[in-house]
Image: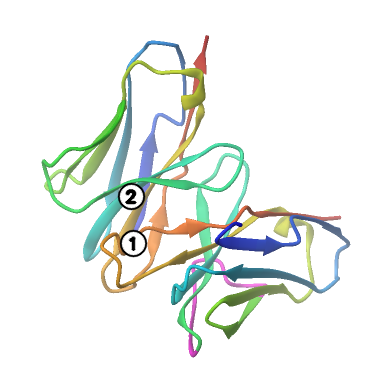
Amino acid sequence: DADVTQTPRNRITKTGKRIMLECSQTKGHDRMYWYRQDPGLGLRLIYYSFDVKDINKGEISDGYSVSRQAQAKFSLSLESAIPNQTALYFCATSDPLAGTTDTQYFGPGTRLTVL
Amino acid sequence: EDKVVQSPLSLVVHEGDTVTLNCSYEVTNFRSLLWYKQEKKAPTFLFMLTSSGIEKKSGRLSSILDKKELFSILNITATQTGDSAVYLCAVANTNAGKSTFGDGTTLTVKP
């Protein structure tokens, strides 16, 4: 079974709808991240969380919100989706106590299309 | 603001060729530089580099970091079609505890 899972894997929605993307991990890592990836571009950080009570904005947090329900769960919400939020979304985890502390482990991604 | 620039943006080679991918960075409080491989799906970890001049090697892939000149290279020797992917470089910042990614290099290896 995958260590980092994301649901849904694909989603098509309409402008103005509220969308939630979910991420779960069984790696036992404290740190979790949400990124978006647009064609031809790298990963841009939306939000990150170092533990359940610590949530931080990334470089492109406008239009998004997150919830860290437990160590293992980190959800990303689009309160009112717009077409330029069409992208591939990745969740990732990392372990600050590991030897390779900055290594991130990625989920399979959610492809979101906003019409 | 932290910045990571990768070059070239794309590269097409034939099997057996050797390629060098470049990553330059500007970051406050550098902690590490990481390389990932992305093949139509989630990025997977290749290397983490923290010290200058020490080569990390895994099979046909190797990488080295120059902290004075602020760059890293990823070498792939005897390329195979399975090496076709996007290679992402990221730099971790000590203070922020997060990574900044470059836009990636798309490598295509033709038979």
Label 1 is placed on what type of residue? Asp
Q: Residue at x 61, y 70 (%)?
A: A24
Q: Residue at x 48, y 68 (%)?
A: A27
- Can you tell which quarter of the image residue A22 is in? bottom right
**Residue B80 position (above or below residue A9):** above
Badge 2, how many Cα within 10 Å: few under 14, some, many 20+? many
**Residue B83 position (above or below residue B72):** above
Label 2 is placed on what type of residue? Leu
Query: At numbered mark 2, what does the secondary structure look like: helix, strand or loop?
Result: strand
Query: At numbered mark 1, what does the secondary structure look like: helix, strand or loop?
Result: loop
A66 vs B103, nearest the viewer: A66
B93 vs A68, nearest the viewer: A68
Marks 1 and 2: CB-CB under 8 Å? yes
Can you give x and y, in whole percent of width and height, for residue A104 in the image? 43, 59
Instruction: Answer with left or right where residue B9 lies relative to residue A10.
Output: left
* Disc 2: which residue: B34
**How many labels were placed on the picture?**
2
- Magenta residues, as a range? A53-64
Q: Residue at x 86, y 71 (%)?
A: A17
Q: Which residue is outermost to the front? A: A1
Q: Residue at x 40, y 29 (%)?
A: B8
* Disc 1: which residue: A102
B45 vs B87, nearest the viewer: B45
Can you give x and y, in whole percent of width and height, for residue A91 in the image? 57, 63
Q: Tell me the chain of label 1.
A: A
CA gap between label 1 and label 2 equals 8 Å
Quadrant position of the N terminus of chain B in the picture: bottom left
Would you say residue A55 sits in the magenta stretch? yes
Q: Tell me the chain of label 2.
A: B
Can you give x and y, in whole percent of width and height, for residue A105 in the image? 47, 58
